Amino acid sequence: MQIRTARLTDAEAIRGIYNRAILTVATFDLEPRSLEEQQQWLALRSGAHLVLVADNGGTLAGFASLSPYRDRPAYRTTVENSVYVDESFQGKGVGKLLMSELVDDARDHGFHSVIARIVSSNAASIALHRAVGFEIVGVEKEVGRKLGRWLDVVVMQRMLSVR
């Protein structure tokens, strides 16, 4: 399994993984992404706000990304992460490989902290984030509605540098 920076040619595989997640509460998006939308999303992520993929001999097993946390300048040293693993690779350590590399890359790019926002029912994602050093810092109650129910979001944070 190779962890590498995503290429524009990975857009279709990333889209497939992400669009399957849209059928669940793993993401709060409601509509599947088109290939063009996925390519635009990838094109906007370069440099410090990157996308990593887990490449298993030409098959993408998952992806993880860093995005700006908020648009106001004082937030520029904090990023938000996302991680999605293809169903056929879940439970095999792919998420931990991706997240470990993503945290290292965030630190290397000079970020101070990484925020994860995870639907409260996603115990696997919460455990993954704990395994790579994230701590729960709060819960946002009923901030989303999907599949006919209200959803809470667990906010987790990983500090990357000492003040």
Image (cartoon, grey):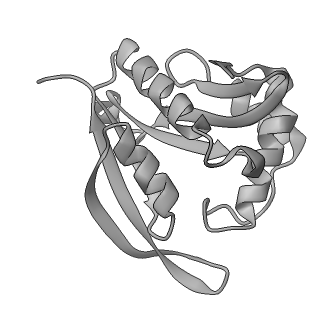
Is residue 57 at all visible to an observer of this figure?
yes
Q: Please state which of residues 93 and 8 is positioned toward the viewer in this rendering.
A: 93
In the drawing, does residue 41 fall left or right of residue 78?
Answer: right
Is residue 44 at all visible to an observer of this figure?
no
- Which residue is found at the position 33% from the left and 23% from the top? 111
Q: Is residue 138 above or below residue 62?
A: below
Q: Is residue 93 above or below residue 47?
A: below
- Which residue is found at the position 57% from the left and 42% from the top? 83
Picture quarter with the N terminus? top right
In the drawing, does residue 17 fall left or right of residue 154?
Answer: right
Q: Estimate the x, y position of residue 28 in percent, counting from the top left.
A: 61, 63
Q: Please state which of residues 137 and 68 is positioned toward the viewer in this rendering.
A: 137
In the drawing, does residue 54 fall left or right of residue 64?
Answer: right
Q: Estimate the x, y position of residue 136 in percent, counting from the top left.
A: 28, 55
Q: Estimate the x, y position of residue 120 in percent, counting from the top left.
A: 44, 68
- Which residue is found at the position 41% from the left and 45% from the top? 129
Q: How many labels, in total?
A: 0
Quarter holding residue 117: bottom left
Quarter holding residue 104: top left
Picture quarter with the C terminus? top left
- Which residue is found at the position 71% from the left and 29% from the top? 42
In the drawing, does residue 130 fall left or right of residue 101?
Answer: left
